[in-house]
Image (spheres, rainbow, N blue to C red):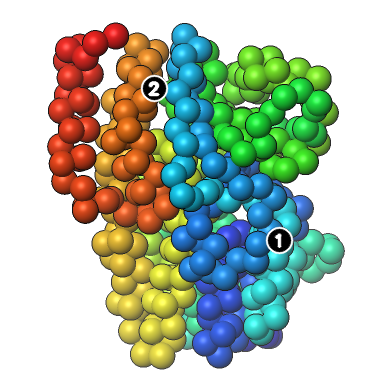
Amino acid sequence: MDEFDAVVIGGGPSGATAADDLARAGWRVLLVDRAGRIKPCGGAIPPKLVEEFDIPNELLVARIHSARMISPTAQCVDMPIDGGYVGMVDREPFDEWLRERAARHGATRLSGTFRRIERDEDGDAIVIIEPKAGGADISVRARVILGADGARSEVARQSISGADEVPFVYAYHEILRTPKASIDPSRCDVYYDGKLSPDFYAWVFPHGSTISAGAGTAIKGFSIRNAVGDLRRVAGLDDAEIVRREGAPIPLKPMRRWDNGRDVLVTGDAAGVVAPASGEGIYYAMACGRMCAKAIDQFLSTRNAHALRKARKEFLAAHGRVFWVLGLLQRFWYTNDRRREQFVKMCRDPDVQRLTWEAYMRKELVRRSPMAHLRVLFKDVAQLLGLAPG
């Protein structure tokens, strides 16, 4: 039976990043991924990710220099990015590049599906994998298992209590071949409209030669596919060729616990690290993967299972406050179309725009502009009480 220091289940941005970091640290790593699965994702990444994780520019299929917020009554507010950009990636080649980088640094790749964790007579973990090529299941011995197998993680479900309690938004998008219609290749359009999403938002994100058009919702019974069809009509994309369709649940709250206290840890969507309100996940997934790799490195070096808990503590120390603020924003402003209309109206404010983009680029709440924060707070309260002018 093959033996590995770490078996990483899932080769998305979080799992591939963790596998790469662990392989670079000299550990024996197995990266298991189900080939052919692509998560529905707008593909937006900040410059901080490009710099922090050494992403080559050729993986950026577009650079976004503004966002357009569109209200239920079709009022449009443009939010230009002053001195920055949002990078766009196609998840299929982007994720594969990350997996290949991990392999170049020593990780072993295996295409297959995680089935279960068994224990030998000494209690050590044996990971059972169904290979993509078929045939008998593969068994490998692991000192630690990292579950990076997405929302509703099977690794988490089998090993960590509370894994079924994370709230989800179901996201669906269609990758469209860019039509001859006039689509600004440097602008993202975000629709806050209850007809397109009763509790989240819909989007049209350019990807160079293609477009991601999608929406999300946690409301059972709401037809998200029909909503994306309506979105295409509203956006003038009726005649666009559909390249592929993708759908999946996206978690909106970090799990209360990420480890089993022994030898299993989860990361990325499996840990619930997708930002509320925005649904942004790539940066947080990769940051989480790096923190988990750091915790696993310490665990493998010391055999102290308490080291695994440090990943969650480090992540929440860095990003917990941002997640809390975004969660409040979503719970209030996404409630109904009247509030969505007010929310889009607030986006006209220069202070709101500047603080929003600065927070996005830096991945932290901006503290250097206390008066701007105070002005935004007063305007926010005025909107809440209906005192702001129309």
Q: Quadrant of residue 372?
A: top left
**For this view, does 191 lie left or right of residue 253?**
right
Label 2 SS: helix
Q: Where does residue 60 sit, x and y in percent of width and height? A: 66, 54
Which residue position holds label 2? 344
Q: Amino acid at mark 1?
A: Glu
Query: Is residue 126 in sight in this rendering?
Result: no
**Secondary element at tag 1:** helix
Q: Residue at coordinates 38% horizontally, 84% vertically from top-left?
A: 298
With respect to residue 34, does 151 lie above or below?
Answer: above
In this view of the protein, can residue 344 be seen by the observer? yes
Q: Position of residue 271 (x, y in %)?
A: 43, 55
Is label 1 in contact with label 2 (beta carbons under 8 Å)?
no
- On-image quarter of the C terminus: top left
Q: Within 10 Å of the Cα at label 1, are there few (<14), some (14-19), or many (20+) other Cα atoms?
A: few
Q: Residue at x 53, y 48 (%)?
A: 86
Residue 319, image x, y percentages: 32, 56
Kind of residue sitting beneath label 2: Val
Furthest-front residue in view? 83
Work out whether mark 1 precedes mark 2 in sequence or the reverse, and give the earlier one.
Answer: 1
Mark on residue 198?
Answer: none
Q: Is residue 66 above or below residue 380?
A: below
Q: Residue at x 16, y 46 (%)?
A: 370
Residue at 76%, 18% in the rendered image: 238
- Between residue 286 and residue 255, name the one nearer to us: 286
Q: Quadrant of the N terminus?
A: bottom right
Label 1 to label 2, Cα distance in Å? 34 Å
Which residue is at the front of the view, 240 or 75? 75
Read off the residue under disc 1. 58
Q: Residues within 10 Å of mark 2 (few under 14, many from 20)?
A: many
| Residue 383, quarter of picture | top left
